[in-house]
């Protein structure tokens, strides 16, 4: 277990929960000294101790055995490091703002170039979507009905509702949206 660096994972989850060393030790029924030794990798905790720590942190115990990448690196996407889907030459670019699609929600930035449409025909997906127009203006076809949206407007698109986005202007339109569950 020494090579797994369990202690740093315990410390990262404790920090994410904003627990002091003493608070986590109390919740896990450990001494602060023992918890400190675990976090500093100077002692290997028993399985029962790890179960107590996991329960106190409200995280599954297996998370302590994952790779050594810091939890924050798995959760944060820094500016400029977004995964890009699509190409501006096709008229629409999507940037995934969540680290991946393994969570319960997908968060994206969509840019629709002037005089472009997101798809040749309206489509639906299995998740509920909410969208907010950051800049520009777009027309959204919702089950065959046109809705014009401008910067500052938002919309909820229910599960299974066919829709397609169109930018009929000469300016770039930027829309941020979330879908649950992820469907890209």
Image: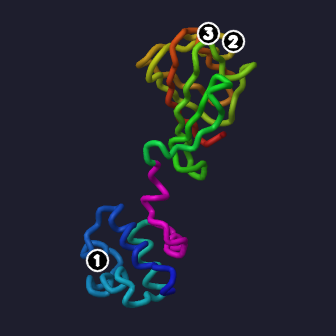
Q: Tell me the quarter of the picture where residue 168 sits.
A: top right
User: Residue 90: where, in percent of width, then height?
Assistant: 68, 25
Residue occupying the point 62% across, 42% down: 182
Circle 2 Cα neighbour tier, 10 Å, few/some/many (<14 / 14–19 / ≥20): few
Q: What's the colour scheme?
A: rainbow
The residue carrying mark 2 is 144
User: Residue 138: where, in percent of width, then height?
Assistant: 55, 14
Circle 3 Cα neighbour tier, 10 Å, few/some/many (<14 / 14–19 / ≥20): some
The residue carrying mark 1 is 26
**Residue 146 tag number:** 3
Comes first in the chain, label 1 or label 3: 1
Q: Does residue 72 show up magenta in the picture?
A: yes
Circle 1 Cα neighbour tier, 10 Å, few/some/many (<14 / 14–19 / ≥20): some
Q: Which segment did they paint magenta?
A: 59-77
Q: On screen, 31 above or below 124? A: below
Q: Is residue 164 left or right of residue 133?
A: right
Q: Does residue 181 show up magenta in the picture?
A: no
The answer to which of 174 and 121 lies nearer the viewer is 174
Comes first in the chain, label 1 or label 2: 1
Secondary structure beneath label 3 = strand
Q: On screen, 68 above or below 38? A: above
């Amino acid at each position: 277990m020494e090579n797994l660096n369990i202690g740093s994972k315990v410390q990262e989850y404790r920090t994410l929960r904003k627990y002091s060393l003493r608070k986590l030790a109390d919740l896990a029924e450990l001494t602060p000294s023992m918890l400190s030794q675990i976090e500093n990798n100077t002692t290997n905790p028993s399985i029962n101790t790890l179960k107590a720590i996991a329960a106190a942190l409200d995280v599954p115990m297996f998370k302590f055995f994952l790779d050594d990448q810091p939890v924050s690196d798995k959760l944060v996407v820094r500016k400029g490091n977004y995964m890009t889907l699509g190409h501006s030459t096709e008229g629409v670019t999507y940037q995934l703002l969540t680290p991946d699609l393994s969570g319960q929600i997908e968060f994206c930035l969509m840019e629709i170039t002037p005089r472009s449409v997101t798809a040749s025909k309206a489509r639906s997906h299995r998740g509920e979507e909410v969208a907010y127009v950051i800049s520009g203006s777009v027309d959204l076809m919702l089950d065959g009905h046109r809705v014009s949206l401008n910067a500052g407007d938002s919309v909820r698109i229910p599960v299974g509702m066919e829709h397609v986005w169109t930018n009929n202007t000469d300016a770039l339109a930027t829309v941020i949206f979330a879908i649950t569950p992820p469907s890209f």
